[in-house]
Image: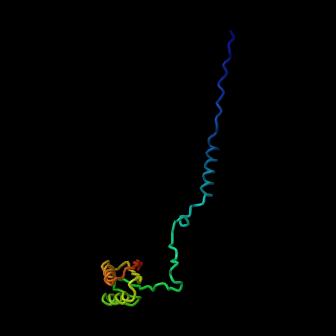
Amino acid sequence: MARTRKRPDSPAAELEMTPMIDVVFQLLIYFIVTTKPVDVITNLDVFRPAPDPNAPKDQKPPNLVRVGVFQDGYTVNDVRATPERLDEALAKVASIDAGQTIMITVSAVSDHGQLVEALNLCAKNGLKSLSVVSASN
């Protein structure tokens, strides 16, 4: 019987992983650099109300009454006012137009009680269209 010669095992075909990893990292960097970030603001669903077709075309927008609440007191349309004067001014505004918009600007250092007092005076005079804005100073 003939003996077969045992050949030494040939090394298995091995793939070098380093070049593959380099290519993967280069592709990863390419895709990270070339992608555009999603602009969130353009994708917001904001629905503004349509204009009232029955509204008169020459109607003026309502005047705005500005009430300021500061640490040292109140203002009405940039004129200093005591709580009594504020009450009188709001009563006068309510007698002319109860649907008048009142914008209350509140200073960050003012007392919460002052804001509550201004809101109570608006409610007492029947003014319901209120807007409260915080001022930084």
Q: Position of residue 73 (x, y in %)?
A: 33, 86
Q: Nearer the viewer, residue 122 or 72?
A: 122
Question: Which residue is outermost to the front?
Answer: 54
Q: Is residue 133 above or below residue 87?
A: above
Q: Position of residue 120 (x, y in %)?
A: 31, 81
Task: Identify the image quadrant of residue 86.
Answer: bottom left
* The N terminus sits in image quarter: top right
Question: Which residue is outermost to the right?
Answer: 2
Left or right of 5? Residue 94 is left
Task: Identify the image quadrant of residue 42.
Answer: bottom right
Left or right of 54? Residue 97 is left
Q: Nearer the viewer, residue 110 or 133?
A: 133
Q: At x 64% / y 30%, what residue is drawn? A: 12
Task: Identify the image quadrant of residue 3.
Answer: top right
* The C terminus sits in image quarter: bottom left
Q: At x 40% / y 86%, what residue is drawn? A: 97
Q: Nearer the viewer, residue 26 or 91?
A: 91
